[in-house]
Amino acid sequence: MTEAQNAVQPPSRATDANASNAQRWRVADVVALYELPFNDLLYRAQQVHREHFSANEIQLSTLLSIKTGGCEEDCKYCSQSSHYDTGLKAEKLMDVDAVLDAARLAKQSGATRFCMGAAWRSPKERHIEPIKDMIRGVKAMGLETCMTLGMLEDDQAKALREAGLDYYNHNLDTSPEFYGQIISTRSYQERLDTLERVRDAGINVCCGGIIGMGESRRERAGLIAQLANMDPYPESVPINNLVAIEGTPLGDVEPIDPFEFVRTIAVARITMPRAVVRLSAGRQQLDDGLQALCFLAGANSMFYGDQLLTTGNPQADADRKLLERLGIRAGSPEPRDATESRESTASCSGGCGSH
Ligand code: SAM
Ligand code: DTB
Ligand code: SF4
């Protein structure tokens, strides 16, 4: 066993006898991964990636803000919070037809998933019917559907599933310890409750967070441990690089070392081997070389299209060229053994360093 492999202990057993997920990642285990020499960490992540996914395939998701601005929540990073003056104009929920037009363009451009986001704390009952029409219409084009609408009640999650929703995005954003410094208007537990409702309704879970909000490495590890210990862990894990928005409390936060961002992708890959890990917001701050490192670290999805929700994204043309230069093809990455349960999150497949 090499020195680097020795550096990370296998995940510990949970002490809670009632926990159905018997193996858990301790925050210390995740910190130990972060602390590996960069090359060792990327080598390990690439091994895990190749064991579970085809190595040169990426999933392309296009985002659309279906309801922009005026949000009552106080997320300190967000351009859409009504608590801050970011110069963004609040809009109403878009018409179904306009949403379907945008989805059609996304499909023509090569996306396979269409993600629709609303600046809501939670949807109101009157929103559910048009939302269902959007889901049905987008699905009918042969695109996968994803919605992110804030907190959901049980019956709302079920209604979205009945309309055919494939994924629901609801992020934990950061570790439980740092969370209070970022959001005060909804609790960590409320986020976990929504995620449980989504899971119970039979919708795939898309859940991740943001890196570079001033959190410590241990707090980044705390977010990853939370995600990896979900039972089962999310199918889709978006890792966002903070887009600093003028007018928000995080508008002038010091940008994170981009290698720390790459490390986070690698750590997510190792701890959630069968999840699709998405290189999400903040790609404009990463040059081609850094993005290539993110793919090497195990990212196998990204947002594709010139716009995220309210901020920019690399031009689709430039992305196509980048993927071509790297020999990465657009597709629908599926974990090799899709029937293998993701419940045993830390069951070692050679990536934990204990062999
Ligand atoms: N309002 C819904 C909610 O927050 O659940 C859905 C939309 S919200 C914009 C979705 C996610 O985008 C957030 O949870 C956050 O992780 C990410 N996000 C928002 N603004 C961001 C920014 N400036 N930089 C990076 N990620 C951001
Ligand atoms: C996620 O984790 N990132 C996306 C999506 N889920 C909805 C949103 C990124 C937003 C970036 C800032 C903006 O464009 O407003
Ligand atoms: Fe609202 Fe979502 Fe922005 Fe928070 S992240 S302010 S909930 S739109």
Image (cartoon, grey):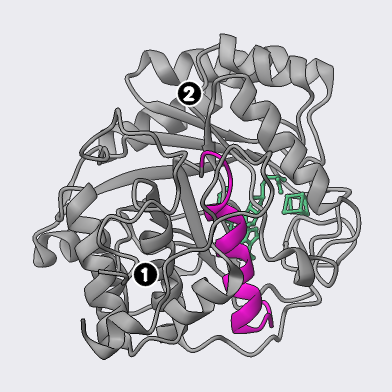
Q: As displayed, is residue 244 above or below residue 253? A: above
Asked which quadrant contains residue 342, the reply is top left
Q: At x 31% / y 72%, what residue is drawn? A: 353
> 225 or 333, which lies in front?
225
Place of residue 191 in the rendered image (x, y in percent of width and height, measured from the top left):
75, 45
Place of residue 38 in the rendered image (x, y in percent of width and height, measured from the top left):
32, 87
Identify the residue under disc 2.
Answer: 100
Point out the tag, 1 or 2, that comes first from the N-terminus.
2
Q: In the image, is 123 to the left or to the right of 338?
A: right
**Amino acid at dot 1:** Ala
Image quarter hosting the C terminus:
bottom left
Q: As displayed, is residue 89 above or below residue 315? A: above
The verdict on residue 69 being magenta is no
User: In the image, which is nearer the foreground, mark 1 or mark 2?
Assistant: 1
Looking at the rendering, the stretch of residues picked out in magenta corresponds to 213-232
The verdict on residue 220 being magenta is yes
Indicate which disc residue 266 carries.
Answer: 1
| Neighbours of disc 1 within 10 Å: few (<14), some (14-19), many (20+) | many
Magenta part mainly helix, strand or loop? Answer: helix
| Number of numbered markers | 2
